[in-house]
Image (cartoon, coloured by chain):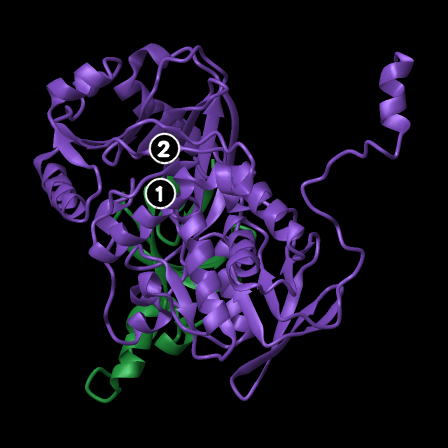
Amino acid sequence: MPYRLLRFALSKKYPEPRMFREPARLKDSYEVVIIGGGGHGLGAAYYLAKDYGITDIAVIEKGYIGGGNTGRNTAIVRSNYLTVEGVKFYDESVRLFEGLSQDLDLNLFYSQRGHFTLAHADSTLRTMRWRAEVNKHLGVNSYVITPEEIHKICPYIDLNCGGGAAIVGALYHPPGSVVRHDAVAWGYAKGADKRGVEIHQKTAVTGIEVKDQRVVGVQTDKGFIKTKRVLSAVAGYTPRITKMVGLRTPLVIQPLQACVTEPLKPWLDHIVVSANLHLYVSQSSRGELVMGASLDPYELHSERSTLDFVEGLADHLLDLFPFLSDIKVNRQWAGMSDMTPDYSPIMGTTPVEGFYLDAGWGTWGFKATPVCGTTMAYTVAKNKNHELIEAFNLDRFKNFSLVGEKGAASVGH
Amino acid sequence: MKLLRCPINGLRPLSEFIFGGEVRDMPDATACNDAQWADYVFNRQGEPGVRKEWWYHTASGTWFIAERDNLKDEFVRTYLYSRAASPAEAKP
């Protein structure tokens, strides 16, 4: 190595910049403990520090940050939901995402692509018209288009689906985007760390101490922490955490699988989703096709991936894009989805004072990352549910006031 | 390929089966209060463990009970509901 390079490596004046520090040990107490160092937990930490001046926070992560579902989703952002509560909430998230690279001073490769949800039957088209009307009413750019218009925008789709159920229309959502998902976690970690938040990786929560229905502390494998406020943002691990505080929830865990192909020249500008074919696909900036399917068919606490999944997905992919038959799958993986019966999240305060939930993120969590950060930060700081998440409280399952979003889930209905 | 033992048809590929959820006792709808009913309708045991579950063999139309470890993805045993000595035995 030339000396003029080596002296940079050896000099203390030019340290390798890190996104965040790794504190040596946990303190005895924190104002707020956040369980889960994914986008949601780190986002909440970031906005608590930035907007409410609360910086005495520990983010406790069992693995490494962004190693859970934040890094396992297909990185799609959209707001063409079905209920008024859902559309308002996810649209605020899209708005935050659009300015997030600037806010975090980190290029998140936020890329607006346009999002198709293909319909292969009249009944699907009916739900899409419904969604389009709700969307338009709330100012979200979303409308139903004909097969001819689909062909004009994305000529590569075989509208006849290889002789299967032909495409009869699509819900088109121009603001639909993809974003580099792990960078979202790193950006929030960096911003939170800069403001004094401590991020503790490889630290597992083993218990939560509750006295008289109030949180008093968190037990970890690296010692006990005294705290009055705990936010759980652990997606597929939520039932294990809620059991520690004695809360019953409707959550069940099912794996959701995804894969990427070898890189191709850029040809697919849009995000294409088909509920009937259980498929969503987009092309990453590296040229890989990023694809996902519906949930695995039974409950399981595992991040294993299966041959059944790739076979089914490849079969359906060829219905839409027959010319991809010689493309190889590079990697496949799974994440643990915490499913709710109404396909809406569970957020906010709980019957346990000081215990806040950001859960029920099933297959729709990544796109909500920034808005979960802002609304959960508000909720934890003020001990009062933010108006955007009031409808998503755990008590809706006591009051039979569900928020039915199944019709807007990308696939699996 | 993953296999599951149907109590009637023996070992069959998992793709022939449908998961029917955990075996749970329904409270008496006329006697319980709204909170108990809501708890039955919505709430589940979400944390990992060995559970008694309903499974359906589609090819032969057989509903049966499987005990399964949902952390290891392993079936412990399967049997027909009628073979469980009482509904209480089918409880987790």
Kind of residue sitting beneath label 1? Val
Classify B66 as above or below A78: below
**Circles 2 and 1: CB distance less than 8 Å?**
yes
Residue at x-position 18% and y-position 23%: A164
Whether residue B13 is visible: no
Kind of residue sitting beneath label 2? Ser
Subunit ID for the residue under disc 1: A
Nearer mark to the viewer, of 2 and 1: 1
For residue A221, what is the image quadrant? bottom right
Q: Residues within 10 Å of mark 1 (few under 14, many from 20)?
A: many
Whether residue A189 is visible: yes
In this rendering, would A248 be left or right of A118?
Answer: right
Residue on which the image places disc 1 = A94
Q: Quadrant of the N terminus of chain A?
A: top right
Q: Are marks 2 and 1 on the same chain?
A: yes
Residue on which the image places disc 2 = A177
Q: Secondary structure at mark 2?
A: strand
Q: Colour of chain B?
A: green
| Front residue (pair A294, A205) | A205
Q: Residues within 10 Å of mark 2 (few under 14, many from 20)?
A: many
| Front residue (pair B89, A230) | A230
